[in-house]
Amino acid sequence: MAKRIVVVGSINLDLVAATQRIPIAGETVAGLSFRTFPGGKGANQAVAAARVGGAVSMVGKLGADAFGVQLRESLEESNVNTEAVEVVPGSSGVALITTDPKGQNAITVVAGANAQLFPTDIDANIDLIRSAGILLTQLEIPLATVDYLAAIAAQERIPLVLDPAPARFLPPSLLKSVEWLTPNETETCILLGRGPQELSENLTEDAANALLDCGSRNVILKLGERGCYVALSDGTRQLLPAYSVKAVDTTAAGDAFNGAFAVALMNGLEPLESASWASAVAAISVTRPGAQASMPTASEVDRFLEESRSAKSTQ
Ligand code: ATP
Ligand code: RIB
């Protein structure tokens, strides 16, 4: 039987206001609409992987509130196993998200129950974690837990995909246990101690090399509509341009990418093929509103790839 993808991470309810323009500090703008969506980087990656056919288990924490019930249902509807998702007293995690018509967003995350996912929870689920074919995590849970998971992944030789989001500086001891580091542009700059900024095109390769020097075995820089830059420990360096789509909401594009990338690797695809397939999954996700709600199924991805091949051949 194929091994499972195990995601250790956050689960949030996203409270999303669509606006004409994301407000600056001190400014009030009129919202165009308000919706709630199941989100959280961990849960989004779990749903992304499960929708495209991965066998996925989630390790996480929910609050004892109505949001928690809704969030578990969303995971289970997508066939994510939630036996290792525990309910704790207090509130579930929430994310306050403002989007604009170009699909850009600004996000404030309140950790709630996610802050209570401790190293002892890794111990409590150690058999599940040790049995994983690949482990996915992010930084919306305590760093001590990510660090502990990374040490176990290294010890057990299970590839760990770390999405270093939200951005923060990480110790080299942690990065050395990471097989796949997948920052976006801002996260790349913060990891390198350069402060939040966009990564200009001519600095992309340097930044990827600098991140490899920090210790992780492979790096994939997620560059939004520019695509992704793959830098492998075998010396491969390649920019994979993004699929051309009309973005309506880029929230969780990175999560779509990571979940799909893990499934592709588990299916035996090579890293570049896996990143290319994950780019297609992420491109579809930006054409739809919401986080988990935007994740495509495997047959939707097949159709999208077929359409983009035939569009290319008629050009
Ligand atoms: P998020 O934090 O919203 O989950 P991210 O900032 O981690 O996302 P991005 O670089 O924005 O990650 O997007 C991840 C991948 O999604 C990109 O590498 C690209 O393949 C795809 N993608 C993102 N935006 C677009 C877009 N406008 N058009 C096509 N593909 C996109
Ligand atoms: O990556 C997107 C996610 O970040 C949203 O779903 C939100 O919950 C925040 O955690």
Image: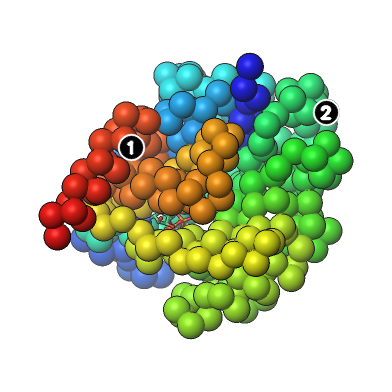
Mark nearer the N terminus (2 vs 1): 2
In the rendered structure, the answer to whether residue 37 lies left or right of residue 184 reads left
Q: Position of residue 77 (x, y in %)?
A: 42, 19
The answer to whether mark 1 is within 8 Å of ligand 1 is no
Residue most toward the bottom?
202
Please state which amino acid type lies under the numbered disc 2: Asp
Could you say which is closer to the camera, residue 236 or residue 110? Answer: 236
Q: Could you tell me residue 34's position as x and y percent?
A: 27, 42
**Along the line of sight, which residue is nearer the eye, 128 or 22?**
128
Q: CA distance from mark 2 to mark 1?
A: 36 Å
Q: Is residue 34 something that shows in the picture?
A: no
Residue found at x 31% / y 63%: 22
Q: Which residue is under mark 1?
A: 301
In the image, what residue occupies the spot 45% across and 35% down? 48
Q: Residue at x 36, y 47 (%)?
A: 280
Quarter residue 244 falls in: bottom left
Of tags 2 and 1, the one toward the viewer is 1
Q: Hey, what amino acid is under mark 1?
A: Val
Q: Kindly identify which residue carries mark 2.
A: 123
Q: Secondary structure at mark 2?
A: helix
Residue 15, placed above or below residue 121: below
Front in this rendered view, residue 90 or 111: 111
In the displayed structure image, the side of residue 173 where residue 88 appears, left or right? left
Give x and y (percent) for residue 64: 58, 22
| Quadrant placement of the C terminus | bottom left
Residue 165 against residue 74 in the figure, above or below: below
Q: Is residue 155 visible?
A: yes
Outermost residue toward the right in this view: 155
Relative side of 42 to 176, left or right: left
